[in-house]
Image (cartoon, rainbow, N blue to C red):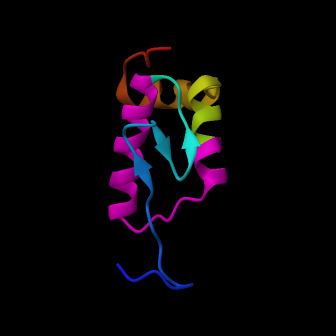
């Protein structure tokens, strides 16, 4: 991919557990977020460092209202 002002580079480093330069110390969380980020990038998302920080925050601070809405849709309990 060309590296000009209009191109996007997804920077994932498995050795240092970083996504877009943001370190994720929990190996399982890093793996899960890497999967989510990579798949959403395939759909056109271009995450910033702030986006990755937000994902980490939400992983540690889930929205109980959203969990309840998912439970209602799926008919089961989201693990917390």
The picture quadrant where one finds residue 27 is top left
Q: How many marks?
A: 0
Seen from the viewer's position, the closer of residues 55 and 22 is 22
Seen from the viewer's position, the closer of residues 78 and 68 is 78
Residue depicted at 64% across the width and 43% down the height:
54
Q: Is residue 7 magenta?
A: no
Q: Is residue 43 above or below residue 2?
A: above
Residue 17 placed where, x, y %? 45, 36
Residue depicted at 49% across the width and 22% down the height:
26
Residue 64 placed where, x, y %? 62, 23
Q: Is residue 39 above or below residue 66?
A: below
Residue 61 placed where, x, y %? 65, 25
The picture quadrant where one finds residue 53 is top right
Q: Is residue 69 above or below residue 54?
A: above
Residue depicted at 34% across the width and 78% down the height:
1
Magenta span dominant secondary structure: helix
Seen from the viewer's position, the closer of residues 61 and 74 is 61
Seen from the viewer's position, the closer of residues 40 and 48 is 48
Q: Is residue 41 above or below residue 23?
A: below
What segment is highlighted magenta in the picture?
27-53
Q: Is residue 50 magenta?
A: yes
Residue 68 placed where, x, y %? 54, 24
């Amino acid at each position: 991919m060309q590296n000009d002002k209009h191109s996007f580079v997804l920077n994932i480093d498995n050795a240092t557990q970083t996504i877009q330069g943001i370190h994720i110390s929990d190996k399982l969380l890093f793996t899960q977020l890497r999967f989510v980020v990579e798949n959403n990038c395939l759909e056109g998302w271009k995450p910033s460092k702030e986006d990755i920080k937000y994902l980490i925050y939400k992983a540690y601070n889930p929205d109980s209202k959203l969990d309840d809405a998912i439970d209602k849709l799926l008919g089961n309990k989201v693990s917390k």
